[in-house]
Image (tube, rainbow, N blue to C red):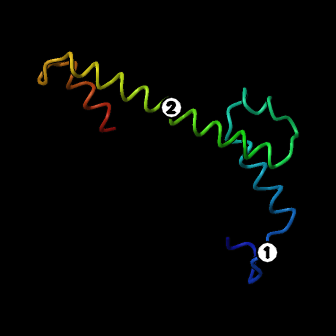
Amino acid sequence: MSGRGSSSRITDEEINELVSKLQSLLPESRRRNIGRASASKLLKETCSYIKSLHRDVDDLSDRLSALMATMEANSPQADIIRSLLRS
């Protein structure tokens, strides 16, 4: 990080700022579960959220593959899905 100068030690203020930024990235429902909890709890919740996002992506990918398998390759629906995947 550029704001820390030549020292490689991070200050408590910087940690608090990073924790706050990380917490702001979580959905509201997950932030309510944490409240003003420790950085450790926030990191655990963030890891849990990322794992759930991976599961969601895998599930949606499987569902999309199954849907594409039922369509003709040159159908208008398949073209729409391909165009959405490219964007």
Instruction: Locate residue 10, reporting x and y percent.
Output: 79, 70
Vertical relation: 18 (above or below) 83:
below
- From the image, state whether disc 1 or disc 2 is nearer to you: 2
Q: Secondary structure at mark 2?
A: helix
Q: Nearer the viewer, residue 63 or 16?
A: 63
Residue farthest bottom in this picture:
6
The residue lying at 81 percent from left, 63 percent from top is 14
The kind of residue tagged 1 is Arg
Badge 2 crowding class, 10 Å Cα cut-off, few under 14, some 14 to 19, many 20 or more, is few
Residue 79: give its label.
Answer: none
Left or right position of 46 against 7? left
Q: With 21 as the anchor, is 85 left or right in this view?
A: left
The residue where tag 2 is placed is 55
| Vertical position of residue 54 compared to residue 9: above or below | above
Pointer 1 local density, CA inside 10 Å: few below 14, some 14–19, many at least 20 = few
- Which residue appears at 81% of the width and 49% of the height? 39
Q: Quadrant of the N terminus?
A: bottom right
Dot 1 lies on which element?
loop
**Disc marking residue 9:** 1
Where residue 26 appears, as percent x and y from the top left, is 68, 37
Left or right placement of residue 83 versus residue 55 in this view: left
Q: Are marks 1 and 2 in contact (CB under 8 Å)?
A: no
Camera-nearest residue between 10 and 84: 10
Q: Which quadrant of the figure contains the C terminus?
A: top left
What amino acid is at disc 2?
Answer: Arg
Front position in the image: 66 or 19: 66
Residue at image x 36%, y 26%? 62
